[in-house]
Amino acid sequence: MIDSAAGLWWAVVGSGLYHGVNPGMGWPLAVSAALMTSKPGSLAKALGLLALGHLLAMLAILLPFSLMTTLVRHESTIRIASGMLVVAMGVYLLINRKHPRFLARVHPAKLALWSFLAAMAHGAGLMLVPIYLGICAAANLDSGHQAAQTLMTGNLSNAIIVAIVHTVAMVIAGGLLAIVIYLWLGLRFLSKTWFNLDIVWAISLIVVGLIGTYSGVIEQ
């Protein structure tokens, strides 16, 4: 049980690092902001706004699950359904390779809003749902016969912690890339060496969704 829970928390960190490295989560915008203003502080400010938007997106997805009383009684069923939803999102992104147009309409200065919308549109929060539900299951199995309200309180805390840990890992990974490019490589290097993780992103959603679905099935 301990090893399983530890693995899930490492998955939270790993997914955060993965989201941070992905240019689609916004770190190139932080580099652009710093280069345009020629102020290193602009980089930190931009990363902070991107982190805020990403954190809010994670909470928007996870908090509803934490407040569901049915999560206590039908946890396995919900894990299966959420896993299938994540798989469906991954399949959709594989088929529809176009970036959401509405993101281009968001003013570059509104980085927190852009980050929130980008994370929602790319299914970043959905990727965390099966992992989060697994953490709740691991915690609840150790809790004995507790009241539903107590379990919901624990789930709410887990949701907040998962979102924070994930976002911190995301900012560290994306921030390091942004700092290296800003200080040494420059925007020209970024434009020439842009790497696209769209296919990898979609496949990773499918993999995480399948794992979540399988874990829910074997625990029924």
Image (cartoon, grey):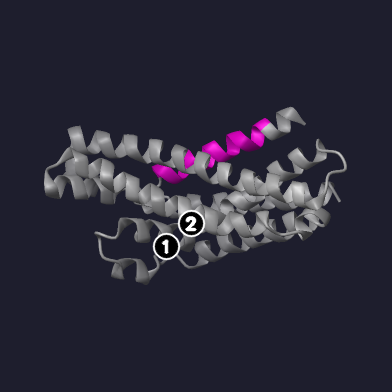
Label 2's element?
helix
Q: Could you tell me if residue 56 is visible in this image?
A: yes
Quadrant assignment for the N terminus: top right
The amino acid type of the residue labelled 2 equals Ala
User: How far from the left and from the top, in percent, is residue 108?
Assistant: 25, 60
Q: Is residue 26 left or right of residue 189?
A: right
Question: Magenta residues?
Answer: 6-21
Q: Could you tell me if residue 189 is visible in this image?
A: no
User: How far from the left and from the top, in percent, is residue 26?
Assistant: 34, 51
The residue shown at (83%, 44%) is: 146
The residue shown at (27%, 41%) is: 44
Q: Is residue 123 left or right of residue 77?
A: left
Q: Quadrant of residue 20?
A: top left
| Residue of label 1 | 117
Tell me the chief SS of the magenta region: helix
The residue shown at (55%, 66%) is: 92
- Mark 1 and mark 2 residues within 8 Å of each other at the beta carbon: yes
The amino acid type of the residue labelled 1 equals Leu
Q: Is residue 168 above or below residue 54?
A: above
Kindly report the distance in space between the C-alpha atoms of the residues bearing marks 1 and 2: 8 Å
User: How far from the left and from the top, in percent, is residue 24?
Assistant: 38, 53
Label 1's element?
helix
User: How far from the left and from the top, in percent, is residue 174?
Assistant: 36, 41
Residue lying furthest top in this view? Answer: 3
Tell me the tag on residue 57.
2
Q: Is residue 18 magenta?
A: yes
In depth, the one of 205 and 79 nearer the eye is 79
